[in-house]
Image (cartoon, rainbow, N blue to C red):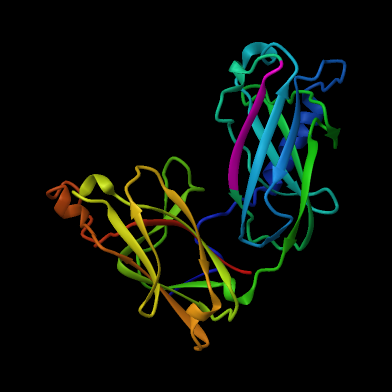
C-alpha cells in the first residue's frame, strides 16, 4: 500500500539553490533602476485560502512598456513564494506561452497557469513575487510594481492552510509504482490498472476532488472511459480522447461517502493494454496499464 500526502507528484522545495542564485544576482548583475521598466505586471488568484497540496489558479498580466525586451533574449518568468519573513519557500518559474522576444510596446500579455501548493512545513500568509530574467545571463529586468528587492515584484498574497485529515489519500490497490519523466524529474505519474482504489477518511461533508489524468487514445478504436465511483454509485465518467493530460474538478456530495469511517474511491478504466503486446515485444513491459494519473487531491468544502 502506497501512502501519499496529497498526490504523488509535486516536490518543488528548492529553497537553498535559489538563495544562492539570489546572491549571484545581487553581487554580479549590476542592477540599476536607471534602466526604464519593460512592463507592468499583475497576478490574480482564484482563491485566498489554499490547503497544503491544493491547486491554485493564477492569471498573469504583463502590460509592456518598451519595444520588445532588452537584447532580444528570450526571458523566463520567475515566481517566488515567500513566507512572512520574506524567505523563499518554493517556486513556479516558467516560460510564458508567448515568447518574450515577440512582446511589443503597449501590448497586454495575459495567460492562466495552474500550480499545486506543495506540502511545505508552513501555515500562514504567503507573498507572491514575480519577475523577468534571462536564462543566458541571469539578469533580471526592471518592471513597474512593488519591488521587494533585486527586481522581484510583489503581485499577490494568499493563506496556506492546513490540510484536512480526509485529504490524506492512500493509493491502495491496483496501482503501479510512481514514475517520472527523464526530461523533467518534477513531472511524475502513476499508472492505473483496470481498477485502482484510493482510500481516505470519510469527510462527512460535501467535498471537491481534483484529478489530472491522461489516457492512450492512439491505442484503441474508441477513447478510454474513466469512471469514478464509490460503491456502486458512479460519480463521474470521463472520456479520455485528448493527446494531453486533462484536469477535472468533481463535486462529491456528503451523501455519496456513506457511513463507513473510510471511503474507497474506485477509478475504473474500460480499456487497458500491455506494452509488450501492443509493441509486439519491442517493449518488454508486461504490466497491465490503464491511464496515467498525475494529480489527485480531495478538498473538504
> Looking at this rendering, what residue extends furthest in the left direction?
280
State which quarter of the image contains the C terminus.
bottom right
Horizontal arrangement in the rendering, residue 91 relative to residue 125 (left or right): left
Tell which of 38 and 228 is nearer to you.
Answer: 228
**Residue at (24, 60) in percent of width and height:** 272
Q: Look at the magenta stretch and give its main secondary structure.
A: strand
Horizontal arrangement in the rendering, residue 134 relative to residue 265 (left or right): right
Horizontal arrangement in the rendering, residue 189 relative to residue 147 (left or right): left
**Residue at (27, 59) in percent of width and height:** 289
Q: Where 104 falls versus 60 (above or below)? A: above
State which quarter of the image contains the N terminus.
bottom left
Task: Locate residue 298, reporting x and y percent.
Answer: 55, 67
Horizontal arrangement in the rendering, residue 182 relative to residue 193 (left or right): right
Tell which of 191 and 218 is nearer to you.
Answer: 218
Tell which of 40 and 163 is nearer to you.
Answer: 40
Task: Locate residue 73, reporting x and y percent.
Answer: 62, 17
Does 111 appear in magenta?
yes
Specify the segment rendered in magenta: 106-114
Task: Locate residue 299, reporting x and y percent.
Answer: 60, 67
Q: Where 231 falls versus 4 (above or below)? A: below
Disc count in the image?
0
Tell which of 65 and 83 is nearer to you.
Answer: 65
Does 26 appear in magenta?
no
Task: Locate residue 69, reporting x and y percent.
Answer: 68, 16
Amino acid at each position: 500500500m502506497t501512502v501519499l500526502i496529497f498526490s504523488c507528484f509535486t516536490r518543488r522545495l528548492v529553497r537553498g539553490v535559489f538563495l544562492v542564485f539570489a546572491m549571484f544576482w545581487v553581487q554580479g548583475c549590476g542592477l540599476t533602476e536607471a534602466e526604464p521598466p519593460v512592463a507592468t505586471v499583475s497576478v490574480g488568484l482564484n482563491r485566498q485560502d489554499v490547503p497544503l497540496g491544493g491547486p491554485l489558479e493564477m492569471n498573469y498580466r504583463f502590460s509592456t512598456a518598451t519595444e520588445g525586451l532588452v537584447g532580444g533574449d528570450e526571458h523566463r518568468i520567475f515566481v517566488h513564494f515567500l513566507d512572512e519573513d520574506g524567505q523563499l519557500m518554493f517556486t513556479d518559474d516558467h516560460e510564458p506561452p508567448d515568447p518574450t522576444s515577440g512582446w511589443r510596446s503597449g501590448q497586454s500579455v495575459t495567460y492562466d497557469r495552474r500550480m499545486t501548493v506543495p506540502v511545505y512545513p508552513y501555515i500562514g500568509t504567503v507573498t507572491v513575487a514575480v519577475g523577468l530574467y534571462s536564462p543566458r545571463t541571469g539578469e533580471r529586468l526592471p518592471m513597474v510594481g512593488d519591488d521587494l528587492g533585486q527586481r522581484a515584484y510583489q503581485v499577490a498574497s494568499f493563506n496556506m492552510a492546513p490540510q484536512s485529515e480526509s485529504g490524506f489519500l492512500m493509493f491502495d490497490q491496483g496501482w503501479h509504482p510512481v514514475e517520472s519523466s527523464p526530461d523533467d524529474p518534477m513531472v511524475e505519474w502513476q499508472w492505473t490498472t483496470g481498477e485502482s482504489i484510493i482510500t481516505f477518511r470519510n469527510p462527512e461533508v460535501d467535498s471537491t476532488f481534483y484529478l489530472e489524468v491522461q489516457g492512450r487514445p492512439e491505442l484503441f478504436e474508441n477513447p478510454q472511459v474513466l469512471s469514478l465511483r464509490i460503491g456502486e454509485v458512479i460519480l463521474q465518467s470521463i472520456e479520455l480522447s485528448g493527446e494531453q493530460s486533462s484536469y477535472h474538478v468533481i463535486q462529491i456530495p456528503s451523501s455519496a461517502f456513506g457511513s463507513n469511517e473510510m471511503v474507497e474511491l474506485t477509478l475504473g478504466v474500460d480499456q487497458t493494454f500491455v506494452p509488450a503486446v501492443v509493441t509486439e515485444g519491442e517493449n518488454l513491459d508486461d504490466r497491465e496499464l490503464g491511464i496515467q494519473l498525475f494529480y489527485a487531491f480531495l478538498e473538504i468544502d
